[in-house]
Structure formats: structure tokens, C-alpha cells
Image (cartoon, coloured by chain):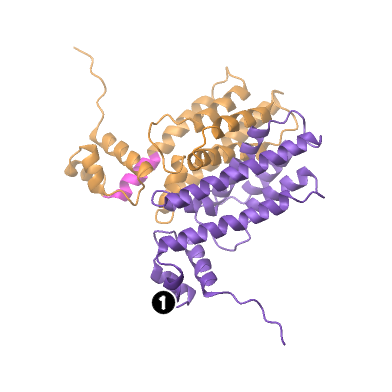
Chain colours: A purple, B orange
Amino acid sequence: MTKTKPTVSNKDIALQTAMTLFLTKGYQATSMDEIVKASKVSKTNIYYHFKSKEELLTAMVDRLIARYERQLASIAAQEELTIEARLERIVSMLVANDDPIDVLGGCPFLTLYMQTAAESEYVRVQIKQFFDRQLLTLERLLEAGIRNQELRSDLQVQPTAALMLTSIEGALFLAKACDNPRILPNLLQGLFALLK
Amino acid sequence: MTKTKPTVSNKDIALQTAMTLFLTKGYQATSMDEIVKASKVSKTNIYYHFKSKEELLTAMVDRLIARYERQLASIAAQEELTIEARLERIVSMLVANDDPIDVLGGCPFLTLYMQTAAESEYVRVQIKQFFDRQLLTLERLLEAGIRNQELRSDLQVQPTAALMLTSIEGALFLAKACDNPRILPNLLQGLFALLK
């Protein structure tokens, strides 16, 4: 018996194609026909999995959020690392652009929110709850770092967590809008200096 | 002779109406006919000033940027204030929402960029240069504050300016996307603690 690579399902290919098109061209500017053409999955097959562009959007948002949350939870749970090292990894993970695609607004969640929040209550609520959970994760790590005396005892938990999350989000957008490669490294340096 | 209030021109009314509609409904979702209807200025009169929706957009962006830059320059030049007080006023001015309108993406520039950058090179360039100038203004104030020993001598100028601008931008978006009124006050507290 030979081992075979796990095959990528047509459903996965359709979702990945939709994600790339929604984030680089825009949700409104992308039609189901284009997704069919770009994915090379048959129309019948795509419509078997997703009845509409809206269904593709919600499945894609769920998948993207789940992917980020797995990474966040995995870093937050690395108890062999200091709190500071875990915070640094979380920030680096959030600003890292692993995908080679050129996301319209820098951050995929900002891009999806701006394009679909007005018409999709589901996307608006999922993105809101995702950001709320990110804030909570950062606040809990900061509290743990203060408790074990790793971080300054006078660090204000909620303002610092808000500063981290908002600056990451703003930096992703501004690095794109200003086309300025210095913004992200400058932000990381500024944030990490703040924790010490 | 009685004094008369300065009259608002039809051109101004058209621009203000276009701004409100572009920022709350979206540029693509707004037609020239809607601007005519909402402004109560005649179609002939609006088209006399602006040949197209694109012309209204560029005039509106110029006006919005000029308004913010006048405020920024006026605060930066208040030499009777400490550098810290001027930085605090700039941050407060940028996050303050004087307009009662509910801007789609929290920040008007982020909202316009996301909706029009793909089709309007002009808007993309103006917004980029506006953010670049904001960064420079913040950097110069931080340098002046370090020179006159008002701010910590080890404050890193570029990272701190980047942290201020990115967190303001991100906070405007997240306060809107998370519908969380604590984000902006938390950010201000976090940023001002950083400078001291």
C-alpha cells in the first residue's frame, strides 16, 4: 500500500478560490461565475456545496476565523514560554502576511467587514465576536504576566490590550494604504518597548 | 445696513451631501441622482460644478483632508502648550467624531480608501500623502519634546509615532466594528501613559 497525500476536496478549492477573490478583488466585484472559472471546479459541484455567493462568504469567514483562533489559542497555551514571548508571537502572527495575496485593506477581517457588513448581519456579528475574543485573550495574558511579576505591576490591562489590538489593525491598513514597509517593523518595536 | 450670515453656496451643499452619502451609504451605492435629491440643489446646478460623481469624490476628499490638516497644523503650532498637551489634543481631535454621521468604517479616510482606491488613483495618492504627513507631524513633535526634555530621552521617535497613528486608525475601525464604546477611551489612556 502506498501512502497518498490527503486530497483537497472540491469544496476546499472553491472556498480557497472565493477567499482569494473576495480579499483581492472584493466581494461585490466577484461573481459566482468567476469563482467557478478560477477554481476549475464544475458549476454543478460548487452549487452542490454552496447555494449562493452569500453561503460561500459565510463558510469562508467561519474558516478564516477558525484558522486565526487555532493559532491564537495554540500560542497562548505555550506555558514553556514567558508571557512576553507569547504576546510577541501573537502580535507577530497577526501582522505576518503568510498568504502571498494582496489583501485590499491590509487585514482580511477589515476588508470583509467593509465590503459585507452592510448586507450580512452574520459576517458583522462573527467579526465583532472574533475581535472581542482577541481582546479577552490579550487581557488574560497581560493579567497572567502581571501576576507572575513578569510585566510591570502598574501596566493597565484593558488600555494596553486595546492599544495592542487597535495598533495591529491600524498598522495592517496603513502599511497597505501608505505603501510604507517601515510601519509594521516600527509598530512591533514600539509595542514591545511598551511591555518592558 | 444689516449684517447677513455668510450664505452656503450650492456647491458647498452638494459637496456636504455627497460626503454624508459616500461615508454612510458608500461611494458605489450612491448615484448622482440621489445626491441631487438629497441636496435639493438642481441637477443643472450640480452638474455645472461637478461633471461626474468622480469629480465630486475628488473635491470632497480634498476638502476633508484640508479640514483635518488645518486642525492638525493649528494644534501643532500652539507653542504656549507643552508638547505633550499638543500630542494629546491631536490624538483627541483625530478620534473625536464631531460629525453626527455614522461612518461605515469608523474613519472617513479608511472608508473612502476601501471604497475607491481600486478605481481612483487620485484618492489613493491623496490619502497616502495625508497619512505620511500626519506621521511626520507626530515625529517632529516627539523630537521637539525630547529636545526640550519634556519627553523621555529614550523614547523612540519613529516607532512611537507609528504606534500613535496606527492605534488611532485601528481604534476608529474597531470601535465601529466591535460596537464597543470602551475601545477609544482605553486607547487614549494607553497612549498617554506611554508618553509619560
At 49% from the left and 56% from the top, the residue drawn is: A104
State which quadrant residue B37 falls in.
Answer: top left
- The answer to whether B153 appears left or right of B189 in the picture is right
Report x, y in % for residue B149. Answer: 72, 23
Q: Chain of mark 1?
A: A
Give the number of marks: 1
- The answer to whether A65 appears left or right of A190 in the picture is left
Query: Is any part of residue A174 visible from this angle?
Result: no
| Label 1 Cα crowd, 10 Å radius (few <14 / some 14-19 / many 20+) | few
Q: Nearer the viewer, residue B195 or B26?
A: B26
> What residue would you read off at disc 1?
A44
Up/down of B133 relative to A78, above or below: above
Is residue A15 rendered magenta in the image? no
Report x, y in % for residue A152. Answer: 77, 32
* Tag 1: amino acid: Thr
- Magenta segment: B52-62
At 22% from the left and 46% from the top, the residue drawn is: B47
Up/down of A76 relative to B66, above or below: below
Q: Nearer the viewer, residue A111 or A156?
A: A156
- Disc 1 on helix, strand or loop? helix
Is residue B58 rendered magenta in the image? yes
Up/down of B34 relative to A104, above or below: above
Q: Nearer the viewer, residue B161 or A140?
A: A140
Quadrant occupied by the N terminus of chain A: bottom right
Toward the top, the furthest residue is B1
What secondary structure is the stretch in magenta mostly built from?
helix
Report x, y in % for residue B189. Answer: 62, 28
Query: Is any part of residue B152 visible from this angle?
Result: yes
Quadrant occupied by the C terminus of chain A: top right
Q: Nearer the viewer, residue B113 or A31?
A: A31
Report x, y in % for residue A55. Answer: 44, 62
